[in-house]
């Protein structure tokens, strides 16, 4: 499947700002099962774009500098991505959770895709005993890694309600866990907490998911959004396998990976500093259109 993705971020600063410097992580990364065919990034009305280095995780980072006074700013990212990724199938030959925990501890791969960096707590996803105990029902060390991963993702999808008003971007995982409500970021963080607490290498994936409208209804342009899910490292043979606890499904042909890190703080689509005295308002519009 080939997708055209248009991601527009608009800022209204209330008053003119004199200077802004932002990191943009909007260009999809190279990842197994997907290929970036074309990409364009534009800023209006002003702004200088240049390369920047990813400080952590796996992301294509662009530095945006605005040194001309502006009140409003628009960042438009346009990508065409080909996705050819099969649905994972658990098998009796899969490594167990104990196997992958041991392989991760023994790994000397310190690259952004190596398992070692994803074994431990991160600033936004601390270890929590209550969440770890709840997840333990699906994480028996002798269980096949893929079977355990999809079981935990499906239980989160069943037991938690999607509620866009229940949490904020900085809500700790334990707060969403207690509410049993939240959004994709919350469900991913809860699952990551449980996996890492059991010694398993798990990463936060940010990107897009194709949404399918109800039967007979047109697809709404701009109504999609960025999405978050979980990657579990399942050993050298299987590599990173994606599971989506918001929907209780595998990462497959409908998911497009934009960036991978320990938590949202490492791979936020846009972050930075702004010098101004007004109140900032942000609006995001995402359109993921399949080309049939």
Image: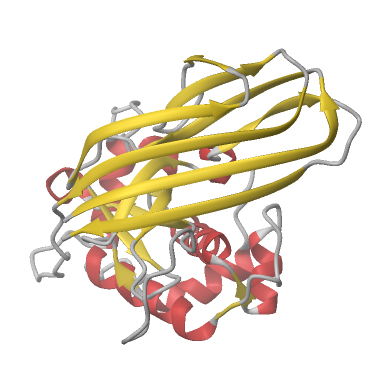
Q: Where is residue 288 in the image (x, y as percent from the top left)?
A: 36, 56
Relative height, residue 75 to residue 50 (above, below): below
Relative height, residue 26 to residue 82 (above, below): above
The part of the image, by quadrant, that contains residue 277 is top right
User: In terms of depth relative to the viewer, which is nearer, 248 or 237?
Assistant: 248
Relative height, residue 278 to residue 142 (above, below): above
The C terminus, quarter of image:
bottom left
Q: Position of residue 214 (x, y in %)?
A: 37, 84
The N terminus, quarter of image:
bottom left
Left of 118 or right of it: where is 133?
right
Q: Residue at x 78, y 18 (%)?
A: 69
Relative height, residue 133 to residue 32 (above, below): below
User: In terms of depth relative to the viewer, which is nearer, 15 or 177?
Assistant: 15
User: In terms of depth relative to the viewer, which is nearer, 134 or 28?
Assistant: 28
Q: Where is residue 193 in the image (x, y as percent from the top left)?
A: 53, 58
Left of 146 or right of it: where is 226?
right
Q: Residue at x 58, y 50 (%)?
A: 284
The part of the image, by quadrant, that contains residue 141 is bottom left
């Amino acid at each position: 499947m080939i997708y055209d993705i248009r991601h527009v971020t608009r800022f209204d600063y209330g008053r003119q700002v004199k200077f802004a410097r932002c990191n943009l992580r909007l260009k999809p990364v190279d990842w197994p099962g997907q290929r970036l065919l074309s990409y364009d990034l534009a800023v209006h009305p002003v702004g200088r774009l240049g390369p920047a280095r990813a400080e952590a995780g796996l992301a294509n980072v662009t530095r945006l500098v605005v040194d001309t006074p502006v009140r409003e700013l628009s960042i438009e990212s346009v990508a065409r991505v080909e996705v050819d990724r099969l649905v994972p199938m658990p098998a009796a030959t899969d490594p167990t959770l104990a196997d992958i925990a041991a392989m991760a501890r023994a790994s000397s791969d310190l690259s952004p895709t190596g398992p070692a960096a994803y074994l431990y707590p991160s600033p936004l996803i601390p270890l929590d005993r209550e969440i770890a105990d709840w997840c333990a029902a699906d994480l028996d060390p002798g269980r096949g890694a893929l079977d355990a991963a999809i079981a935990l993702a499906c239980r989160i999808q069943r037991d938690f309600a999607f509620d866009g008003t229940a949490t904020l971007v900085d809500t700790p995982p334990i707060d969403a866990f207690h509410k049993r409500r939240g959004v994709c970021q919350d469900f991913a963080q809860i699952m990551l907490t449980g996996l890492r607490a059991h010694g398993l290498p798990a990463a936060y994936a940010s990107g897009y998911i194709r949404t399918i409208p109800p039967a007979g209804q047109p697809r709404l342009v701009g109504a999609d959004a960025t999405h978050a899910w979980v990657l579990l490292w399942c050993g050298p043979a299987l590599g990173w396998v994606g599971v989506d606890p918001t929907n209780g499904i595998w990462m497959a042909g409908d998911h497009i990976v934009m960036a991978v890190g320990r938590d949202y703080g490492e791979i936020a689509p846009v972050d930075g500093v702004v010098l101004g005295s007004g109140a900032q308002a942000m609006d995001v519009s995402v359109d993921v259109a399949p080309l049939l």
